[in-house]
Image (cartoon, coloured by chain):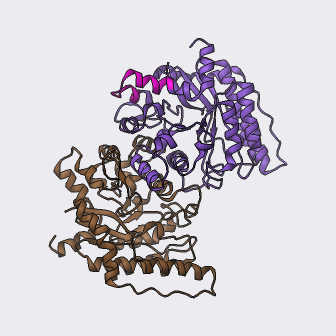
Chain colours: A purple, B brown
């Protein structure tokens, strides 16, 4: 089967988006009404999914998407800790309903109620709620909840250890994924996302996080940011900084998705990165929605690029399915329970 | 001939480095002595150059390096505007002396006395001094003088126009090059440099800078950051954002160097980016100094990767020489005046 490890609910029903607008308005001006979580009918959810993610999933030939709330809307830098928690729960609950309606097509990945300067206690609690109570199989962890000002400690800092301890206990991985940028220097999907991927990888090179957490696992999305293109630089820097070789030091715990929107990029990814570290992903419907005039196909139809690779069927099976089942063991268990 | 567009004086004589330490110490504690610019003998300079850059230039078969002060030591975030100016002048004057001693092997590129929050008036003045009085052929412009906090406006903001006006008047390009990072999230050469390259490119996509300055030219180093690897994403984002196609909108004015430290990266660069937009560069002696165990060669011996490309001799000539002469017309004029 074909598992897309990177999809967001970018097409959520309008009442959900309106709730967020009203929530932030109330935060800024307490005389405005505090909105309740909106009632959204199953049909409303079905419509947004069937005309978008499910339609494209079928057209492109994927079977199941690891589905999380819209990353750019996580907005951890907006409001405060309570605002982040209320919004995050609404987002995760909505994704849970999508999975309930389409259990064959989606598995759930949660956003976390991070907030700049806040401790991680509510993050740990929400992760546990999603995984234990709602059956989520992974989470998205934002290394920069300040939204482009990069004020949190590096991901290797002990600040983050409470969430890592819970991830290890629950055996769920995190995708390292920032949200919108409120720094005018960084376009969200054109700079902030890619920079965060590159930054996280280099933090892992510098640190010794996986000595403390040998089973902790991260997916770095967008093809690993700049890392595979500069793989020689990272191998050389590890050497210069007297770090162990990347294979044992980082790459037992870090995986890249295939959200790279042209064939030469995917060719490079598969050439330099071990196939066991690559998970099929499309970020669909997401960052880039148009058709590439040079191919006549959607930029983000990344399955085509994998299909076109001159690698063995077994290698493709790893990229499309086996690696995801290994990195997300709770997904694997759910699939097996359903006979897949 | 072979022109390396990206070399820094990373091996400057010790008195120069000591001056900087004492200068910053005095800034923090005015009771400490204010150091004068140190006297450095020609032989001291010769020794640092002949045993490093010149030795490697000869061993690797390059002819001339566009040589600028050490980028990571520009340190625009340290001290204040006056400190930045004094340090910048000392750095540029030292590079000028290297070129005076080895005019066949080096041409000079200046650092600029930027300082967070300061206007660009002393930057413009120092650029003019270097180009008009000292014969420099280009400059390094730091898009983030705050050193990893990204507090300056984007490069497309009118804030930067005074330096662009001077660059156009003098007909010199700028390499977009950050300095050290004082943000613990960003390793300088492993994250901050690459992120800045990616960020600058996306700013150019978003803006209309080259409509206002049709002859303004930038070199984005380190192979253009993440951009070539994600070339489909950038083409797609330009389309989604209703920007013109990149060829006319950005790529008449923006060039990438070849500081990508493995063959697959260079292969990708040349595959997706027009050969007229690629300038040979090595960043030698710089970010990555070791030997790649998979090849037995230095990571930063990027000439080998170009030599190995299956492209025409004419295309190699463009990458190695012709593009640099076109992008740096003052270099071309100097070379022609010397019969090269």
- Residue range in magenta is A304-322
**Farthest left residue in view:** B339
Q: Is residue B26 above or below residue B56?
A: below
| Front-most of residues A192 and A45 | A192
* Residue A117 x/y as whole percent: 72, 53
Q: Is residue A114 above or below residue A270?
A: below
Asked if the magenta segment contains residue A308, the reply would be yes
* Residue A274 x/y as whole percent: 43, 34
User: Residue sitting at 28 percent across and 80 percent down?
Assistant: B100
* Residue B320 x/y as whole percent: 24, 58
User: Residue sitting at 44 percent across and 67 percent down?
Assistant: B71
**Farthest right residue in view:** A31
Q: Is residue A126 above or below residue B163?
A: above
Tally of numbered tags: 0
Asked if the magenta segment contains residue B325, the reply would be no
Quadrant of the drawing holding the C terminus of chain A: top right
| Front-most of residues B61 and A279 | B61
| Front-most of residues B248 and B49 | B49
User: Residue sitting at 46 percent across and 58 percent down?
Assistant: B189
**Looking at the magenta stretch, what is its main secondary structure?**
helix
Q: Is residue B192 above or below residue B125?
A: above
| Front-most of residues A194 and B102 | B102
* Residue B187 x/y as whole percent: 52, 56
Residue B199 in sight? no
Residue A72 in sight? yes
């Amino acid at each position: 089967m074909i598992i897309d490890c990177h999809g967001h609910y970018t097409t959520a029903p309008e009442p959900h988006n309106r709730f967020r607008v009203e929530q932030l308005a109330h935060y800024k001006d307490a005389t405005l009404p505090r909105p309740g979580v909106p009632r959204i009918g199953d049909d409303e959810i079905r419509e947004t999914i069937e005309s978008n993610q499910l339609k494209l999933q079928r057209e492109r030939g994927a079977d199941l998407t690891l589905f999380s709330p819209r990353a750019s809307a996580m907005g951890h830098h907006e409001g405060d800790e309570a605002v982040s928690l209320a919004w995050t729960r609404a987002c995760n609950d909505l994704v849970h309903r999508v999975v309930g309606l389409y259990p064959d097509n989606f598995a759930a990945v949660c956003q976390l109620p991070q907030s700049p300067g806040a401790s991680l206690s509510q993050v740990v609690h929400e992760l546990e709620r999603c995984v234990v109570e709602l059956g989520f199989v992974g989470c998205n962890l934002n290394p920069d909840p300040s939204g482009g000002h990069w004020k949190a400690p590096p991901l290797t800092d002990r600040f983050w250890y409470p969430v890592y301890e819970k991830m290890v206990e629950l055996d769920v991985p995190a995708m390292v994924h920032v949200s919108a940028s409120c720094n005018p220097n960084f376009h969200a999907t054109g700079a902030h996302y890619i920079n965060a991927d590159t930054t996280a990888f280099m933090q892992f090179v510098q640190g010794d996080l996986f000595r403390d957490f040998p089973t902790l696992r991260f997916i770095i999305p967008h093809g690993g940011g700049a890392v595979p293109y500069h793989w020689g630089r990272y191998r050389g820097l590890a050497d210069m900084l007297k770090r162990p070789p990347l294979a044992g030091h980082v790459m037992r715990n870090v995986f890249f998705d295939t959200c790279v929107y042209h064939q030469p990029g995917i060719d490079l990814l598969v050439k330099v990165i071990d196939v066991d570290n690559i998970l099929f992903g499309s970020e669909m419907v997401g960052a880039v929605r148009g058709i590439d005039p040079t191919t006549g196909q959607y930029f983000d139809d990344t399955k085509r690029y994998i299909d076109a690779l001159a690698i063995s069927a077994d290698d493709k099976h790893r990229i499309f399915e086996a690696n995801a089942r290994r990195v997300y063991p709770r997904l694997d268990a759910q699939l097996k329970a359903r006979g897949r």
